[in-house]
Amino acid sequence: MTIATPERYAEMLDAARRGGYAYPAINVTSTQTLNAALQGLADAESDGIIQVSVGGSAYFSGQRVNDRVTGSLAFAAFAHEVAAKYPNTVALHTDHCAKQYLDEWVRPLLAVEADQVAHGKEPSFQSHMWDGSTVPLAENLDIAEELLAKSVAAHTVLEIEIGAVGGEEDGQRAEINEKLYSTPADGVTVAQRLGLGENGRYMAAFTFGNVHGAYKPGVVKLRPELLGDIQNEVAAAVADGRIAGHATGRGFAGEVPENKPFPLVFHGGSGSSAGEIAEAVSHGVVKMNIDTDTQYAFTRAIAGHMFAHYDGVLKIDGEVGDKKFYDPRSWGREAEDSMARRVVEACERLGSAGRRLK
């Protein structure tokens, strides 16, 4: 598995859009969870995306350092080394950068990557997300235009979010209400402002009832058909001249379906039914974030180990315990295997299993 070049990443995203499948984008917070994600993608024979959040990037730097740029670059450097030992391709991504974190996270990273490109190197990351879900759409797109220009210089892809995702992630909260649903008019506005590839490549996370976190059935009301409505309205606007751009513009690896002008992203998918996921993917979702479920799979294995070997991992009643059970590698391997199995499951649900690019 090698880290994708910008050209390879474009090829991955377009292949998914043409082929009707999506890549799991696995959030990681440590070298252990990164290794688990790589293992799972390899076991599934799938390409994929591995990402760090605003909190995860700081955590990577160490809790005493707590610096998002340092943690992000350390994560990327480690990933570049270990990913080279696997046969498929992975892209690196920063996830959910809200407005208050831009100046201390994504903007500095884009500057670093523009300098890398200027010196003939590949960028450390392949894409970055601007999370404008808490600001008005006009301001969201003003910032997106600025970041898209910087992304072109850095040879990276921009991800934007239109509308709010409910629930909580890294301290960002949103209520579960009608604000969670984007509209076809929003899609037209985005395409008119940002183009459809000719001004730089981006992915769009339109909201259709998505909620971060874990919820019981019935709480989350997904409407994946809304994604099809958005795609169809934008395609119609291209056909009748309301949108001047075209989805085979600069930065796209090849022809893409006319009825899927946006490469879409699915956020807050934990607990979604197989049917809801399949329908969302059928409308052009090429990336689905996976976080809560893999966190649980990793931690559940650790909990199982501790309960099963209680008297080995603890020094009780004056005994010395059993080093082979409290050695972090013993429970770490179990946790990585458990998380890797959940990654394989995600690849199978999204249709990317067995479809890595040659």
Image: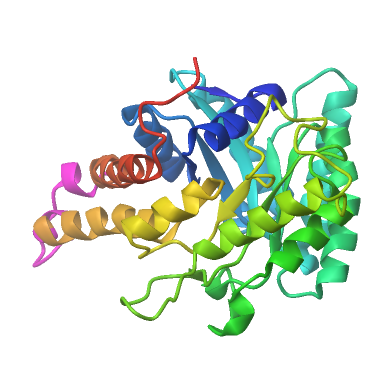
Residue 318 is a magenta residue: yes
Where 76 sits versus 64, above or below? above
Position of residue 91 measured from the top left corner of the image (x, y, whole percent): 59, 34
Q: 2 or 161: nearer the eye?
A: 161
Foreground residue, 243 or 291? 243
Is any atom of residue 290 visible in this view? no
**108 drawn magenta:** no
Residue shown at 46%/40% (left/top)? 34
- Residue toward you, 22 or 299: 22
Tell whether 178 sits left or right of 236: left
Give the quarter of the image for residue 155.
top right
**Is 338 on the left or on the right of 161, as rendered?**
left
Residue at far top of view? 358
The quarter holding residue 192 reads bottom right
Image height check: is 190 above or below 263? Answer: below
- Magenta residues span 310-328
Query: Is 135 placed above or below 91 here?
Result: below
Task: Please state if 296 lies on the left or on the right of 141 as rendered.
Answer: left
Number of on-image labels: 0
Relative to 6, residue 129 above or below: below
Q: Residue at x 68, y 47 (%)?
A: 262
Q: Is residue 96 visible?
A: yes
Pinpoint residue 74: horizontal percent, then vertical percent.
63, 39
Residue 24: horizontal and vertical position, in percent?
46, 44
When asked about the image quadrant of residue 319, the answer is bottom left
Residue that appears at 79% across and 20% down: 121
Coloration mode: rainbow
